[in-house]
Structures are given as structure tokens and as C-alpha cells.
Image (cartoon, rainbow, N blue to C red):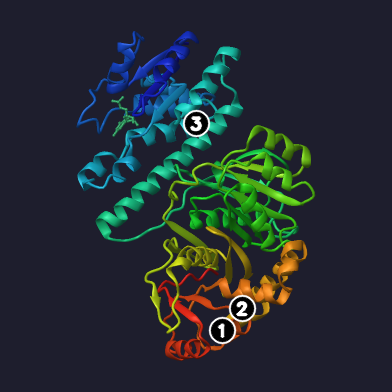
Amino acid sequence: MTKRALISVSDKTGVSEFAKALIQNGFEIISTGGTSALLKKEGIEVKDVSDITGFPEMMDGRVKTLHPKVHGGLLYLRDNPDHMKQAEANGITAIDIVAVNLYPFRETVAKSDVTLEDAIENIDIGGPTLLRSAAKNFASVTVICDPADYAAVADELTKTGDISYDLKKKLAVKAFRHTADYDSAVDTYLSKAILGEKVKRLSYTGGEKLRYGENWHQEATYYKELTGTGPNLSNAKQLHGKELSYNNYIDMDNALLTLKDLNSKDPAVVIVKHNNPCGLATGKTLKEAFLAAWDGDPISAFGSIVCVNRPFDVETAKLLDKKFIEIIIAPAFEPEALEMLKNKSETLRLLELVGFDKPFDNEYVYKHVTGGLLEQTRDIGLFEKWDVVTKAQFPDSKKGLSEFAMSACKCIKSNSISIAYEYEPGCYMLLGMGAGQPNRVDSIGKLAAPKARNNLKEMYDRNEELQKAMTYEDYVKQVFSECVMASDAFFPFDDSVIYANEFGLRYILSPGGSIRDAEVIATADRLGVSLVFTGMRHFLH
Ligand code: 5GP
């Protein structure tokens, strides 16, 4: 018996070629209005669905394929004698392939001027029904909801004269996932438009099993977001190295966010360890930025993730010779640099990630808590204001460095403190950072400032000219007096300013907003420290 394929598509990409391939493989094509007209125009022989159903397509296309002659032909069990008898008695013949893609509902409601009527007219009824009928009977029927799958189906048919069970079942699951996503888009839109209610359905695909979770005894899976054009870890192309782990994804995300936030026009490098940037710098070249970022914490940089905003070049690749890092993320790799890095290590993961310069696709971020999902918009922006609140002035020339310092703070876990240094005119580095402390003074006094001192010691020890020019203590004094220290949130007491001053830090940024702001300002004035309130808090938990 001649095999039959029903084709009814909104997105007509590749459909003519597919129909031709089906005909070459002995199929008869049945189609709906628009699709049929297109195929006929291409000289392809097509039977209209209305000829099968005995009903015209009606009500502006609301009813086209919703008929027992169609759905019976999809749903009857080919090895069930009763079904077969009933099919025959009712003039129902088998349909073996369904190729359908749906009215563009998501695209319609994404338009700023969409009306409710427009949205409703774009809810496809017959299409999902066709997909679901075909997918339910996947043992006998092949269902295609994505033009990207035409080739695989046509290929198998041409090579083997049939479609494998393996492909049929994969396509069936894909179709059910597709209609579920489609319905969730309808639900999300209508809940808001009609009921004023916000519902959240996250749409992820391709659950990829990871070797383990945060620790070896934990199971883990990576679900990919349906993506757009912005930077996105799921779009990253792995060019080399072993598979990515659960912790890798977390650190890669922090690296990406830090560089995106910094939004530097100059070459920039971030080095991430344990979900915190431990090194961050800009430079005139990528090599310079890399060296300065590394100087931000050479100890922690061991086993880190490096993310850069420029094509990874040979000069920078050479610097990695004796350094152990886990991952490099770059918008591109120069071919020679790529070869060097591949030869350096079997395991080093090299990822090409495009879209750095584009906005994120998703305006919201999520955190799962026991029993619920928290949603918030991204922490976009840096300062709400620029209020110099002390007698000591904060020179405008330090604005660039201040932006760098606060931008680093945004991506360091609270309570976060960053100490930033302009190591060369226009080039900034994170000289010290304090992360994740339950109080702010420890982030300054026990972490950021002592770490900055340590880093300066290494920088001093390898610079003979500097050693001739001044003592280490004078060097620290000079550098600290030029640095900007940023805090992600207000100072609840004046002790943070006191600690910072003891280390010789003179320029401090904080959002302000504490009930003790006046006390903090008075202490800064007494110490001659210069303080800016920025009005925008950047907690990151
Ligand atoms: P065409 O351009 O061929 O006229 O229409 C193709 C579209 O119609 C496809 O997106 C398909 O999902 C949809 N479709 C097929 N049958 C029906 C039906 O009975 N009712 C509705 N509302 N849409 C259908």
C-alpha cells in the first residue's frame, strides 16, 4: 500500500525538498491550504486534506485536520485486528509520517504591540493535535516538528527504504517536548494577559548527565536553556579537553558574568576559582591583562578558569607554559595559540563562546530553595549616584578605577571587598579581594588588604629597579594610597573605614544607606579618607 505523509507547516523552510524526497521514496503527500499551495507551485503532487476528510478547511483555518479520517489514520494500532477492522469499515487509511510545525505563538506574543486577539488566533490547535497523535503512535508513525530533522528522515528512507524505530522514538519525545513548551508559552502569556497572574515554567532541554555533582557522591545533570543570541554557556563550543563538570559550569558562569559586567573596551582577563573572581585585569594587550590578572592572586589561580574578551593569542598562550589551569573561555582562539594550548595538556578545556558583546537573553535569574524557586531580574548597573560625602575629595580621574573596583565587587560573593589598582595609566587590576565573609571587616582586614600586600611583595621582589628606588614598605604605602577599595554594601559601623585607613587605603566606595552613615563619614573625615556613596548595593549570595 502506498505510504502517506501529512505535511502542514507554518515555517516552510526546507519543506519542498523534503516533500520531493518523500515522493522519491514512494510516498503520497497530503497537505493543508498554505503548505499545499506552496508545494503545488513547486510542481509537487499533493492531495488536499479536505479531499481526505470530505470537509473544507473552515473558520479561518481553525478547523483543517481535526477529523477522524486524519486522526484515525494516525492513531490506529497497526497490529490490532479490531482497530484495523474499524479503520477499514470507516474508510480510514494509515498516515505514516507527519511533518508539522506550529503557528508562531511565541514570536507573536513577543511583539510589543500584540493584541489578545492576535495572540489567540496564533494558538495552534490542529498542529499540536497532529503532533501528539503521531507521537503517541510512534511505533508506526514518524513525527517531525522541526525542519532540522527532515534530512535525517529523508536520509534513512533513501538508504534503507524505512525509518528506524530508534529515530521514530527520538522524534516522538521531541514532539511531546515541543508541544509541552508550546502550551507552557500559551499558559504563561494568557495567565498574565487574562488573569494578571505570573506563572513560571522554565523550558530546558537536553538533560546531559555529568560525571558527578559538586562532590563525587552526588549525581548531576546539566539542562540546557532554549537559547537566543546572547552569551550562553550552552552555546559554547568545546574545542579541546575533557568533559565539563558541575563545578566547571558554576565557575564558567561567574567568569562570564564578571567579564560581561566589566564591559571593558580594552583587553580584559578574569581568573575564577570557586565561584569568585580571584584575578581580574584590563591591559593594553591581552598578555598584559593576563599577567596583571594573575598577579591578583597567583596562589588561587592554580587550577582556575580563565575567561578573556579577545581572541586568545600566541603571546598569551606562551604565558601558560608552566601554569595549571582548567578551562580557557574566549570569543575565539588564534590557530597557532589553539595548537599550543592543545599540545600543552590533554585535559585543558578550551571553549569558544560568542556573544560577549550582546545582552543576556534572559532578563531573570533563578535560585532554587527547598520548596520553591526564587526569581529576580539581573543585577544590571553599577552606580545610582556619585556622592563624594567627605571633606577629602575623590578625584574624577579615579572614576574609571572605581567602576572597575565596584564591577569586580559585584561578582564576588558577599560580603565582598575589592581593592583595585591602576598599575599603568588606564590599565586596572584587582590587587586584593575579600569574599564570602559573614562580616565586612574580615573581608577588608583579614583578606583583601593582606592579600593585596602579599601580591605587592611578589611584584616588588621580581622588580630590581623598584627595589633600588624604594623599600617594600614605601612601595606598599604608595600603591595603597592610590588604590580604590569598593564594598558591595554599606558599612554598618565605622570600623571598616578605620581598618582600611590602617592599611593606608585612601579612596573608598560604598553604596551608603546605613543608619550610621553620619558616623562613618565623620570617621572618614577625621582620618582624611575620601568616601563616595554610590547608592546601588550589589549583594551576591
Ligand atoms: P497552512 O499554511 O498549510 O495552511 O497551515 C499550516 C499550519 O496549520 C501548521 O502550523 C499547522 O500546525 C496548522 N494546522 C493544521 N491543522 C490544523 C487545524 O485543524 N486547526 C488549526 N488551528 N491549525 C491547524
Number of numbered discs: 3
Ligand 1 is located in which of the four quadrants? top left
Going from N to C along the chain, the mark reached first, 2 or 1, is 2
- Callout 3 amino acid: Asn
Mark 2, residue position: 444
> Which numbered dot is residue 137?
3
Q: Please, which residue is most extreme toward the front here?
A: 469
- Label 2: which secondary element: helix
Residue 227: percent from left, percent from top: 47, 43
Q: In this rendering, would 388 be left or right of 65?
A: right
Q: Quadrant of the C terminus?
A: bottom right
- Callout 1 amino acid: Ser
Residue 5: percent from left, percent from top: 43, 19
The response on whether ligand 1 sits within 8 Å of label 1 is no
Residue 382, can we see it? Answer: yes
- Label 3: which secondary element: loop
Mark 1, residue position: 496
> In which quarter of the view is residue 475 placed?
bottom right
